[in-house]
Image: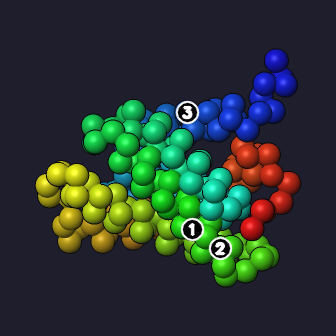
C-alpha cells in the first residue's frame, strides 16, 4: 500500500485534491483584499521553477483540469493557462540561473501567478466570455501574485515531495 504513495502521479492527485478542497471551501471565505486566492496556479508555477518547463507544464495541466472540474468557466481554460504558466516560468528560471535562491523562487512564482491571472482573462475573452478584462483585473493579479509569492517557500517542499525531487532540476 505504501508503495503506491511513492509514485509521483498518486502524490500529484493527493496534493491536487487537497489544495482544490482547501481552495474551494476555506479559501473562498478568506479573501485578502476581497480576492479569492488561486493556490493551484501557484503550485503550477512552483513546479515549473523547481522541476523545469516540461514537468511544470504537465503539473499545470493536471492542476488546471482539476480546477476546471470545479469551475463554471469553459472546460480546459484553467488547464491551458496553468500549463503555459508552469512551462514559461520553468523556461525563465532555466535561462536565468542554474542555482536556486529563495527570493528568485518567490519572485518567479509571484510574477508567474500574476501573469497567469491576466492570461486566464485574456484567453477567456478570446473564447467568447465577455467582461473578463476590466481594470479590477490588475488588482486581482497583484493580490494573487503576492499571496502565491509569499507562499512559495511552503509550496517548494510540497512540490519537491509530490514530484519526488531531491533537488531542483533547473
* Left or right for 75, reference 165: left
Residue at 31% x, 70% y is: 139
Location of residue 133 (image quadrant): bottom left
* Residue where numbered disc 2 is placed: 93
Circle 3 or circle 1, nearest the eye: 1
Name the spot of residue 121 as percent of width and height, x first: 28, 59
Judged left or right of residue 1, residue 34 is left
SS for callout 3: helix
Mark 1 lies on residue? 89
Q: Which secondary structure lies at badge 1?
A: helix
Q: Position of residue 61 (x, y in %)?
A: 51, 46
Q: Residue furthest bottom?
A: 96
Q: Whole-percent x and y of residue 141?
A: 37, 67
Residue that appears at 42% across and 51% down: 80
Left or right of 88? Residue 36 is left
Give the Cα separation between the discs numbered 2 and 3.
Answer: 27 Å
Could you tell me how far apart the alpha carbons at marks 2 and 1 are, in whole angstroms? 6 Å
Which sits earlier in the primary sequence, circle 3 or circle 1?
3
The mark found on residue 154 in the picture is none
Residue 120 location (% of width, % of height): 34, 58
The answer to whether 93 appears left or right of 87 in the picture is: right
Which part of the image, by quadrant, shows the C terminus? bottom right
Asked which secondary structure carries label 2, the reply is helix
Dot 2 or dot 3, earlier in sequence: 3
Does any portion of residue 157 appear in the rendered image? yes
Foreground mark, 2 or 3, reads 2
Q: Which residue is mark 3?
A: 17
The picture quadrant where one finds residue 3 is top right
Contact between marks 2 and 1 (CB within 8 A): the answer is: yes
CA gap between label 3 and label 1 equals: 23 Å
Q: Are marks 3 and 1 in contact (CB under 8 Å)?
A: no
Label 2 environment density (alpha carbons within 10 Å; few <14, some 14–19, many ≥20): many
Amino acid at each position: 500500500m505504501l508503495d503506491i504513495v511513492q509514485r509521483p502521479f498518486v502524490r500529484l492527485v493527493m496534493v491536487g485534491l487537497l489544495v482544490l478542497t482547501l481552495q474551494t471551501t476555506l479559501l473562498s471565505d478568506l479573501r485578502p483584499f476581497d480576492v479569492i486566492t488561486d493556490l493551484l496556479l501557484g503550485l503550477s508555477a512552483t513546479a515549473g521553477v523547481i522541476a523545469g518547463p516540461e514537468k511544470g507544464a504537465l503539473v499545470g495541466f493536471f492542476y488546471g483540469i482539476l480546477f476546471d472540474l470545479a469551475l463554471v468557466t469553459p472546460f480546459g481554460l484553467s488547464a491551458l493557462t496553468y500549463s503555459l504558466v508552469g512551462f514559461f516560468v520553468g523556461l525563465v528560471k532555466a535561462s536565468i540561473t542554474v542555482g536556486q535562491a529563495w527570493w528568485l523562487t518567490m519572485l518567479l512564482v509571484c510574477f508567474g501567478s500574476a501573469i497567469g491571472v491576466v492570461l486566464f482573462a485574456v484567453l477567456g475573452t478570446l473564447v467568447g466570455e465577455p467582461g473578463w478584462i476590466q481594470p479590477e483585473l490588475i488588482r486581482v493579479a497583484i493580490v494573487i501574485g503576492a499571496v502565491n509569492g509569499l507562499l512559495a517557500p511552503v509550496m517548494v517542499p510540497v512540490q519537491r515531495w509530490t514530484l519526488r525531487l531531491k533537488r531542483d532540476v533547473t
